[in-house]
Every structure is written in structure tokens, then in C-alpha cells.
Image (cartoon, rainbow, N blue to C red):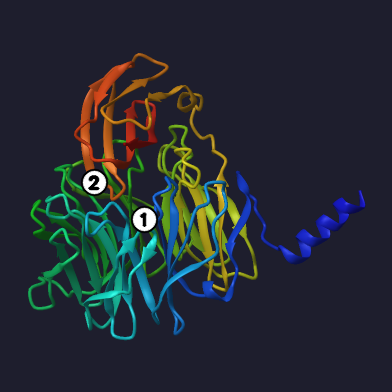
């Protein structure tokens, strides 16, 4: 009994984090001084061990670019510093030279640089400067194959710029402005960036939060983009995120305006967006993404604000009135969050940060907000890993659709009408990790697919 009391005293004195949600306990990844000023958290398999690692950028005068290796047992390594760069604003990953290892692009520095770091069997080379003095500020970067040549490129937004950096396949990049202050039909001030196929044509488009509002840059397929201004009412958009909130098979948008107001826009499948709701229940978030419980439910909003990291449950009508605190700590001002599948369960977990020195995660134990939570456990996809084909068995012999995406969100394969027991040929996919989405009338179910 006395050991239990001592343990309680330790928890309450030395570990004030309060976990009030339907998630696992807080697991600290890093609480050292390195973690002050986290600016972005992303995931990639840095060491090719089959588990998603965490890549982080840190801003401030002692800014860093670093990663934490996933040990495969729900723990992470200590920090691995790649480079010390003051005011590192963002980071993204991709295989830029085709060697099968994930490389890194970072933005920031006192001269607003774009730097690429090549991964050599889990060790990173010195940074190679791709561009410098990009704009008054650099704000975000997203990696994808934007010109459909099978090679990953990246797009960087700055305060007055949006540029595509095309990759020749060897890690050599050529810069092509998408818009400049002289060619833009409206004032060009880009603040946040997301990527998704917004009109279902198989090409990765750009969704940008700007001072003029929400802008979608539709991709012709060759890396040539055309802006569409979704609204222009002098409402600054600071955060953007894409997700299929209504489970109709296309990407919708959640955004935050400079007033702190959060709204969601539905997509009709062609990229025409409609304002559906202003989400008063999501209070002025610092960081916003979405996460699914993995049981066929609709995506929930996962966000940080003030001293909270919270989940706002989607009731299937895109009403988010129920808030679940993942973590609340009055001593922390919460920073960026991310959703990462830590243990290859097919369900993403809660990664979060506190500006005053912490990076941590909570396991997603599975929230049940659907009438048929048993379906996901009855879904059978085999063999997985695989090379040429998979079978998909569902508990009901109803038609379903399949979409397979790479980890950059690019649609790689689509089949509209299948039945349980269907044999799916995936021999055309390159080896690697993919997201398999099974779209049924009662929900969208996601699983990790590994192609050997």
C-alpha cells in the first residue's frame, strides 16, 4: 500500500499532465531544452524498419532540425539532431534521389532558406541549400509528385511567394514560381499550406490559407497551377487542413481565420466548396488536424489550444460539440499536434507538443461513435504485406469502393464496385507503404497496406 501511495505522490508532484480522454496515458518523447519552440511535427520511416518515426523542426534563435526513431515498442529514441538552424519554420519528407531512403526538406533560417538533407542509410548529409532569401518569411512546405513523373517535388510558401521546386530524380531542383506578387490577380500573402486531390482528377492540388482568404490551386497534372479564390471577404486564413469530414469520398477543408473562428467547407467532388458550418465549439486552435478512431467513424477534429490538446467528436452530421481532453496542463502552452500510426495498428495516435519544452504522445484506444463498431475488427485484408494482390473480406456482402493512396495523399488506385472476397491486383504499385480506404455506406475504413 505504501508503494502505491508513493507512486501517487510522484505522479501528482512530478507529472501534472492530466489525461481525461479515451486515450492511453501520456508518454513523454522528449522534455529536454531542445524541445522549446516546436514549429512542426511530421512522420516518416527514417531508418526503414517499418515503423513511423517523428521528424521535428524547432524555431527560435536556437532552432533545430531533428528526428526521433520509433523503437517499435511504443517508445522513441532520444533526439537525433540533423542541423542547428535558427528559426526553422517547417519540415517535410520524401525520397528525393530514388534510393529508397526518406530525405528531408526544411525551411527557415535568418535568410529564409530552403535546405535539403539526404538520408544515407539512416544518417543525414550536411544540408544542401536549394534556395535562399525566398521572401519576407517562409511559412510552410509540402512534398508530392506534382508533375506526375513519378518523382517527388515540393512546394514552399512564403509571405509573398508560392513556388514549385521540380525534382529531376537525382535530388536536383529547379524553381518555378506558381504565383508572384506581379502575376497574382490578388494580393499574395501565403500563411499555411495543405495538399490533396480536390477535384478527383488524380493530380495533387494545393490548399492555401492567405490574407485574402481560402485559395485552392488546381494542378493541371504537369505542375502548372490555377488559383481559385473560395472566398474573398478580407478574412485572413491562418490554418488549413483537408479531410473527408462527411465520408463522401472527397476531401473537405477545415480552416481557422485570424479571428480564431474555425469553419468547415464541403466539397462536391469537383473542387467546388461550400461553407457548411462555423465550429464555435473549437476555440481558436494553435494547430489543427483530423484523426479517425479506426472503427468506420467519421473523422474527428484533433487540435491544440491554450493549455489543451483535445479531440472534438464528429457526430456524423459534422457537429463537433463533444470535446474530449487528451491532455490538459495549466503549465504548458500547447503547440503543434500530429496524427501518427505509432504501432502499425491502422489507427493513428495523438502526437503533441508544449511550447515550454515537451513532445509526447497518447495512444488512440479507439473512440466508438458509430452504430457498427464491430465492422473494423471483422474486416480482413490479406496477405499484408504483399506483392501482387490482396483479398478483402467484409462482414456484409454489400458493394464497396476501394481507394489506395501513397503517404503523400496521392491517389494510386481506385475501384468503384467490389464485393466481399474480391481479389485486388496491386502489382502496379511500387514497394512501400500505402493507405487503403474501403468506402462503404456506413463509413470509410482505413488500413495500412505494405507492398513488398
Where, by quadrant of the figure, is residue 82 drawn? bottom left
Residue occupying the far right of the picture: 2
Q: Is residue 270 left or right of residue 2?
A: left
State whether residue 403 is above or below residue 276.
above
Question: In the drawing, does residue 336 fall left or right of residue 164?
Answer: right
The disc placed on residue 410 is: 2
Q: For the residue labelled by badge 1, is the local secondary structure a helix, a strand or a loop? A: strand
From the viewer's perspective, tell me whether residue 88 is left or right of residue 18.
left
At x 24% / y 68%, what residue is drawn?
A: 156
Q: Residues within 10 Å of mark 1 (few under 14, many from 20)?
A: some
Q: Nearer the viewer, residue 295 or 424?
A: 424
Q: Position of residue 108 (x, y in %)?
A: 33, 77
Q: Is residue 161 visible?
A: yes
Count the labels in the image: 2
| Residue nearest the observer in this picture, 140 or 45 | 45
Question: Can you give x and y, in whole percent of width and height, for residue 442 in the image?
Answer: 39, 27
Q: Which residue is mark 1?
A: 263
Q: Are marks 1 and 2 in contact (CB under 8 Å)?
A: no
* Residue 279 visible from this viewpoint: no
Q: Residue at (48%, 38%) from the top-left corner? A: 345
Q: Position of residue 280 (x, y in %)?
A: 45, 56
Vertical arrangement, residue 291 with respect to residue 92, above or below? above
Please give the name of the residue rendered at 33% of the width and 62% of the height, measured from the top-left corner: 119
Sequence-wise first label, 1 or 2? 1
Within 10 Å of the Cα at label 2, are there few (<14), some (14-19), or many (20+) other Cα atoms?
many
> In x, y percent, where is residue 415?
21, 28
Q: Is residue 293 above or below residue 122?
A: above
The CA span between labels 1 and 2 is 25 Å
Q: From the viewer's perspective, is residue 428 above or below residue 26?
A: above
What's the residue at 14%, 54% (across, down)? 218
Amino acid at each position: 500500500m505504501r508503494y502505491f501511495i508513493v507512486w501517487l505522490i510522484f505522479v501528482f508532484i512530478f507529472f501534472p499532465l492530466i489525461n481525461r480522454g479515451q486515450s492511453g496515458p501520456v508518454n513523454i518523447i522528449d522534455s529536454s531544452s531542445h524541445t522549446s519552440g516546436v514549429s512542426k511535427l511530421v512522420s516518416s520511416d527514417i531508418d526503414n524498419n517499418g515503423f513511423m518515426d517523428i521528424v521535428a523542426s524547432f524555431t527560435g534563435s536556437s532552432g533545430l532540425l531533428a528526428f526521433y526513431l520509433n523503437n517499435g515498442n511504443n517508445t522513441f529514441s532520444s533526439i537525433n539532431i540533423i542541423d542547428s538552424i535558427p528559426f526553422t519554420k517547417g519540415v517535410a519528407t520524401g525520397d528525393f534521389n530514388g534510393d529508397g531512403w526518406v530525405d528531408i526538406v526544411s525551411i527557415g533560417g535568418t535568410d529564409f532558406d530552403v535546405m535539403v538533407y539526404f538520408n544515407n542509410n539512416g544518417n543525414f548529409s550536411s544540408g544542401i541549400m536549394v534556395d535562399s532569401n525566398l521572401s519576407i518569411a517562409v511559412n510552410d512546405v509540402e512534398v508530392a509528385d506534382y508533375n506526375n513523373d513519378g518523382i517527388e517535388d515540393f512546394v514552399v510558401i512564403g509571405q509573398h511567394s508560392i513556388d514549385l521546386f521540380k525534382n529531376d530524380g537525382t535530388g536536383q531542383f529547379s524553381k518555378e514560381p506558381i504565383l508572384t506578387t506581379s502575376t497574382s490577380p490578388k494580393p499574395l500573402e501565403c500563411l499555411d499550406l495543405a495538399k490533396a486531390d480536390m477535384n478527383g482528377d488524380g493530380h495533387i492540388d494545393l490548399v492555401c490559407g492567405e490574407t485574402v482568404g481560402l485559395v485552392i490551386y488546381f494542378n493541371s497534372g504537369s505542375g502548372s497551377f490555377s488559383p481559385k479564390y473560395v472566398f474573398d471577404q478580407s478574412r485572413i486564413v491562418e490554418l488549413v487542413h483537408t479531410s473527408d469530414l462527411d465520408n463522401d469520398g472527397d476531401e473537405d477543408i477545415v480552416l481557422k481565420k485570424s479571428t480564431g473562428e474555425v469553419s468547415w467547407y464541403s466539397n462536391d467532388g469537383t473542387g467546388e466548396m461550400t461553407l457548411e458550418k462555423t465550429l464555435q465549439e473549437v476555440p481558436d486552435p494553435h494547430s489543427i488536424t483530423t484523426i479517425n478512431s479506426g472503427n468506420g467513424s467519421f473523422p474527428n477534429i484533433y487540435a491544440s489550444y491554450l493549455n489543451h490538446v483535445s479531440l472534438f467528436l464528429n457526430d456524423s452530421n459534422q457537429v463537433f460539440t463533444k470535446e474530449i481532453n487528451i491532455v490538459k496542463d495549466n503549465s504548458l502552452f500547447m503547440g503543434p499536434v500530429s496524427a501518427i500510426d505509432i504501432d502499425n495498428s491502422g489507427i493513428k495516435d495523438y502526437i503533441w507538443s508544449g511550447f515550454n519544452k515537451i513532445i509526447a504522445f497518447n495512444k488512440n484506444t479507439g473512440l466508438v461513435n458509430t452504430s457498427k463498431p464491430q465492422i473494423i475488427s471483422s474486416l480482413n485484408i490479406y496477405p499484408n504485406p504483399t506483392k501482387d494482390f490482396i483479398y478483402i473480406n467484409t462482414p456484409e456482402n454489400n458493394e464497396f469502393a476501394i481507394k489506395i493512396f501513397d503517404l503523400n495523399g496521392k491517389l494510386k488506385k481506385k475501384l468503384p464496385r467490389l464485393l466481399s472476397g474480391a481479389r485486388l491486383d496491386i502489382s502496379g504499385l511500387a514497394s512501400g507503404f500505402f493507405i487503403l480506404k474501403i468506402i462503404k455506406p456506413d463509413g470509410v475504413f482505413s488500413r495500412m497496406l505494405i507492398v513488398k
